[in-house]
Amino acid sequence: MIALIIIAALILIILLTVNIPVEAYIRFYGGKADIKVKYLFLSLYPKKEKPPKKKKRRKDKPNNEMPLPVSEETAAEDSSEDMPEKDSPPKAYTVRTEKATEKQSTSSKEERSSDKKKPPKEEKLPLLERISAKLDELTEKKNSVMLLIELVTEPLKRFGSKIRIDDVIIDFAAADEDAAKAAISYGTIGAAVYDGISFLRCFVGMSVRSVNISCLYNTPADKSRYDGECKVRLRPASLINAVFAVGFGYISNKKKYSPVMELFRKG
């Protein structure tokens, strides 16, 4: 009975932790991005850098040992050992001859191995056959990509509906010294912003605080402004559910979606 209570408590704790949302604060002002990710009271990003540990320097102990005196007999023996014998051949000549023989043997071995490793020349296919093979490969990739989109579309839609984007602030300014170019860029930016917001609202829950798009005439183009911020919330359980949905869809119809795995293996 106690074991069942412990297991139930662990499952309850896991469910609670998975359903607590992760919050990401994204700010972009003056060409610099500032991203902060928090989960409860924990800061997931950016992580605080730990200060480097200071290494203790070891003091070198003074060497108080005095060198031993060298006697005259030992010095004479060392000098006699260093003198070459009269009858023996010079060492440099013997070393050079040995190295030459070794180089000859290694070069002959490499030539033999290279002769053995040379593969037979493959005959090239005609141009039409190569083009048809390439087209077949492209059609196979296209079919596998379409199957991947079919497999992922529904789980992604459900996953997108669980994402929440709030407190969106957009402050853009189109600048140019030429008034016509400034007006054209102002129109394109405005259309892109409002179309993007409407597109995202079809899949993601979204609340906009303010949108400000202005046009700066007789102003250098580098004075254009693209500032904004937003807050993104997501529960880890939604991501886990999406992954399980994709995996279950693949396993339930493995024969149909087998080209998808081949696409990943080849890629």
Image: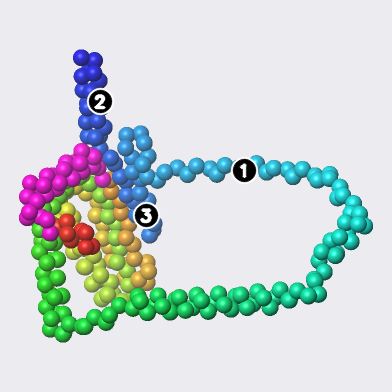
The residues bearing labels 1 and 2 have C-alpha atoms spaced at a distance of 43 Å
Residue at screen point 6% across, 55% down: 256
As drawn, is 45 to the left or to the right of 256? right
As drawn, is 33 to the left or to the right of 81? left
Whichever of callouts 3 and 2 sits on the residue coming sooner in the sequence is: 2
Q: Which mark is residue 33?
A: 3
Kindly identify the amino acid type of the residue bearing the numbered disc 1: Lys
Residue 112 spot, x, y in % from top left: 41, 78
Residue 60 spot, x, y in % from top left: 74, 45
Majority secondary structure in the magenta region: helix
Name the residue carrying label 1: 55
The residues bearing labels 3 and 1 have C-alpha atoms spaced at a distance of 35 Å
Name the residue carrying label 2: 10
In-front residue for pair 121/161: 121
Kindly identify the amino acid type of the residue bearing the numbered disc 3: Ala
Up the image or down, 185 lies above or below 195; here it is below
Identify the residue at the far right of this view: 72
Q: Secondary structure at mark 1?
A: loop
Q: Which mark is residue 83?
A: none
Residue 201 spot, x, y in % from top left: 15, 51
Identify the residue at the far top of this view: 1
Let me know if residue 253 is in the magenta part: yes
In-front residue for pair 34/170: 34
Residue at screen point 68% across, 43% down: 57
The residues bearing labels 3 and 2 have C-alpha atoms spaced at a distance of 39 Å
Judge whether residue 121 can be spotted in this image.
Answer: yes
Looking at the picture, the colour scheme in use is rainbow
| Magenta span of residues | 232-259
